[in-house]
Image (cartoon, rainbow, N blue to C red):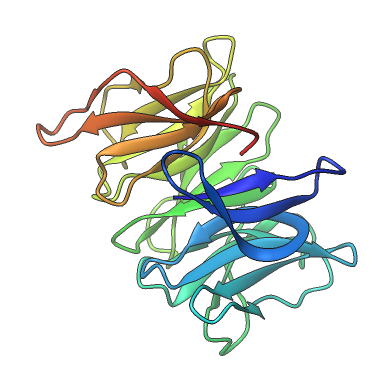
Amino acid sequence: MLVYLTGEGPARFGRLVWSDREGRTEPLWSEPGVYGNPKLSPDGRYLAVSLLRDNNWDVWAFDLDRSVATRLTFHAGYDADQVWSPDGEWVAFASNRDGGILLYKTRTDGAGDAELVAESPQGSDWYPTDWSPDGSLLVVQSATQAGDIWIVPVEGEGEVRPFQASPFSEQAASISPDGRFLAYQSNESGREEVYVRPFPEGSGKWQISEGGGGYPRWSRDGREIYYRTDEGIASASVDLSTGALRAERHRLLFEGEF
């Protein structure tokens, strides 16, 4: 499991580490810095991160075998919040290169220029949070006052539409490996909790966390959901085999500011 570890010093500084299920960590990218949104590539060979250097956010890809970092975006502004395409050939990211923060994609081999995917119909800033396993859809978080989750066709064919829009704040959406469910955090209960809904459509909603939780991520086999709590990193086992979702009581894996 990959986590972002808050280090000593200014709160925004931290280190990227590997962690096992007992919380034992090992440095991944040894240089302390201002990192965001670490995401493993589909083949597990690369780590994409948002990195702030010289007051400029960019997307980088870190080769885990060779410990070599490659910069993927070069705009003098905000390029961050990246997600991988399921084939690993693209990353989608948020950028302010044309004014407001919009949705772009760029090839991970460095070929060609970044391409605009879609503009927000609300005129609000957009931040991608996941890419569907079939490659057709992006899940996007809008920076409205409440915060909503949208579904965006990658190739522009189909309707840009809200997935979860309410007076409450919904964010940090993550699609299950089979593409049938979406986990996200919401403050609809009065505090942040993790929920799951069918994806890209369907009825039903299940609360996963207990006593607060956020930033959910699925295990690669779809049998667990990991998420952050005030204490550390927790896990809840889930069963998707029946077409519905059954979740077991969560358990704290390890403590710490991850």
Give the residue drawn at x 71%, y 28%. 145
Where is residue 154 drawn, in percent x and y? 44, 63
Q: Quadrant of residue 69?
A: bottom right
Give the residue drawn at x 36%, y 55%. 132
Q: Is residue 186 left or right of residue 206?
A: right
Where is residue 2 drawn, in percent x and y? 50, 52
Give the residue drawn at x 56%, y 20%. 192
User: Which residue is nearer to you in this view: 177 or 102?
Assistant: 177
Where is residue 180 drawn, in percent x and y? 25, 43
Q: Quadrant of residue 118?
A: bottom right
Q: Tell how many labels.
A: 0
Where is residue 28 drawn, in percent x and y? 59, 63
Give the residue drawn at x 42%, y 68%. 155
Q: Quadrant of residue 32?
A: bottom right
Q: Is residue 194 left or right of residue 204?
A: right
Q: Is residue 145 left or right of residue 140?
A: right
User: Would residue 164 be visible to someone looking at this image?
Assistant: no
On screen, 17 above or below 228? below
- Which residue is the extreme one toward the right? 54
- Which residue is the extreme one toward the bottom? 111
- Which residue is the extreme one toward the left? 242
User: Would residue 178 be visible to someone looking at this image?
Assistant: yes
User: Which residue is nearer to you in this view: 85 or 17?
Assistant: 17
On screen, 224 above or below 97? above
User: Which residue is nearer to you in this view: 200 or 41?
Assistant: 41
